[in-house]
């Protein structure tokens, strides 16, 4: 089943906006992580770690989920399909893994925010390089997904080739009987 042109454009727009939004949110998150790690102002450091948890819940998680869902809708509603091309499968895998890692990491954000909120916890205990590493890795992963989406490397799966042959066979004119 393919979508009509208008619906396809709406789905594409939703996917591009959520994916670009996710990338942008990770950039902001990386900035917060760097501020938390290197700022000399104790209140700024604590505030950065408190903001990271909120930014993750209100931006990263919803945008990751939206990118995943709209990507699936986009692939199912277009001729690209979900399992016809290797680049779509890789992009789906990247998005699923990145989203699952983000969800698993949410508990760590809560622990860091709790430590940052407690004025009795030493500032060096609050500082944590993990968010910088994770945000940097997330940017790299999202960049790879973006490159796949833009360049769409060739390579159809066996399922894709089979579907293509079926579609060609169905669209071929019926054979004329021999006389």
Image (spheres, rainbow, N blue to C red):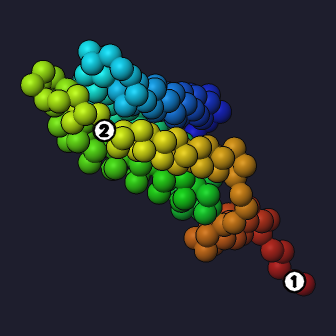
The furthest residue to the bottom: 179
Is residue 143 rendered to the left or right of residue 22?
right
Image coords of residue 48 (percent x, y): 32, 22
Task: State which quarter of the image contains the C terminus.
Answer: bottom right
> What kind of element bears circle 1?
loop
The mark found on residue 128 in the picture is 2
> What kind of element bears circle 2?
loop
Image coords of residue 153 (percent x, y): 71, 57
The residue located at (54%, 53%) in the rendering is 91
Of mark 2 and mark 1, the one earlier in the sequence is 2
Residue 110 visible in the picture: no
Is residue 122 rendered to the left or right of residue 150?
left
Residue beneath disc 1:
178
Image coords of residue 80 (percent x, y): 63, 52
Residue 108 visible in the picture: yes
Q: Nearer the viewer, residue 51 or 5?
A: 51
Residue 156 vs 99, above or below: the answer is below
Crowd tier of the residue under label 2, counting other residues whose Cα lies within 10 Å: few below 14, some 14–19, many 20 or above: some
The residue located at (37%, 31%) in the rendering is 37
């Amino acid at each position: 089943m393919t979508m009509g042109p208008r619906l396809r454009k709406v789905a594409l727009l939703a996917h591009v906006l959520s994916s670009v939004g996710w990338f942008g949110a990770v950039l902001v998150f990386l900035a917060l992580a760097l501020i938390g790690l290197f700022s000399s102002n104790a209140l700024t450091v604590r505030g950065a770690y408190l903001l990271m948890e909120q930014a993750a819940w209100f931006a990263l998680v919803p945008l990751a989920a939206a990118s995943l869902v709209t990507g699936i809708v986009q692939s199912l509603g277009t001729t690209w399909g979900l399992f016809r091309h290797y680049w779509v499968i890789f992009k789906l895998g990247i998005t699923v893994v990145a989203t699952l890692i983000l969800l698993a990491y949410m508990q760590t954000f809560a622990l860091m925010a709790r430590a940052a909120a407690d004025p009795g916890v030493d500032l060096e205990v609050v500082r944590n390089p993990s968010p910088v590493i994770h945000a940097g890795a997330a940017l790299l992963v999202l960049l790879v997904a973006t490159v796949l989406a833009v360049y769409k490397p060739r390579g159809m799966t066996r399922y894709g080739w089979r579907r293509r042959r079926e579609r060609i066979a169905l669209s071929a004119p019926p054979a004329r009987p021999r006389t």
